[in-house]
Image (cartoon, rainbow, N blue to C red):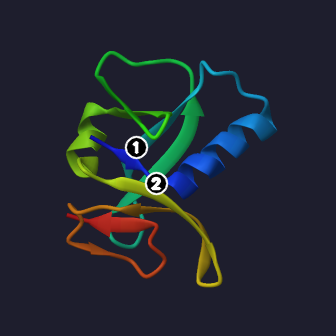
Amino acid sequence: MIFISEKAREKVTKLKEDTGLSDDYFLRVSVVGGGCSGLSYKLDFDNESQPNDQVFEDNGVKLVTDLKSFLYLCDTTLDFSDGLNGKGFHFINPNASRSCGCGESFAV
């Protein structure tokens, strides 16, 4: 399962409203190669499911990931911070053995 915090849910809902996306759109979460630790997170709105997608719903948000990314994202929580130490989405990933200082990439 992939989880989403209340603050991240509020931000995702606002972003969808601001861009005029319909309820057909969901949040696609994926892992791609790159970044200073080897793997990076990627977030997009999407409205087309793929054959091997893993679909979850948490806190009223539909979260979709491909099977390969799910292996890295299992039990991860998407959070949002608007504090002084950085603003934006970040991932609380129990599978990551290390992450870079900016929190944009990780390794397992």
Vertical order, 28 against 105 (above or below): above
Expressed as whole percent of the image width and height from the top left, the position of residue 102 reads 49, 77
**Within 10 Å of the Cα at label 1, are there few (<14), some (14-19), or many (20+) other Cα atoms?**
some
Expressed as whole percent of the image width and height from the top left, the position of residue 19 reads 78, 36
Residue 107's disc is none
Residue sitting at 37 percent across and 55 percent down?
77
Residue sitting at 71 percent across and 44 percent down?
14
Q: How many marks?
A: 2
Q: Amino acid at mark 2?
A: Ser
Vertical order, 90 against 71 (above or below): below
Secondary element at tag 1: strand
**Within 10 Å of the Cα at label 2, are there few (<14), some (14-19), or many (20+) other Cα atoms?**
some
Expressed as whole percent of the image width and height from the top left, the position of residue 38 reads 32, 65
Q: Nearer the viewer, residue 22 or 31?
A: 22
The residue tagged 1 is: 30
Q: Nearer the viewer, mark 2 or mark 1?
A: 2
Q: Quadrant of the C terminus?
A: bottom left
Residue 5's disc is 2
Q: Nearer the viewer, residue 26 or 101?
A: 26
Vertical order, 38 against 72 (above or below): below
- Left or right of residue 42: residue 36: left
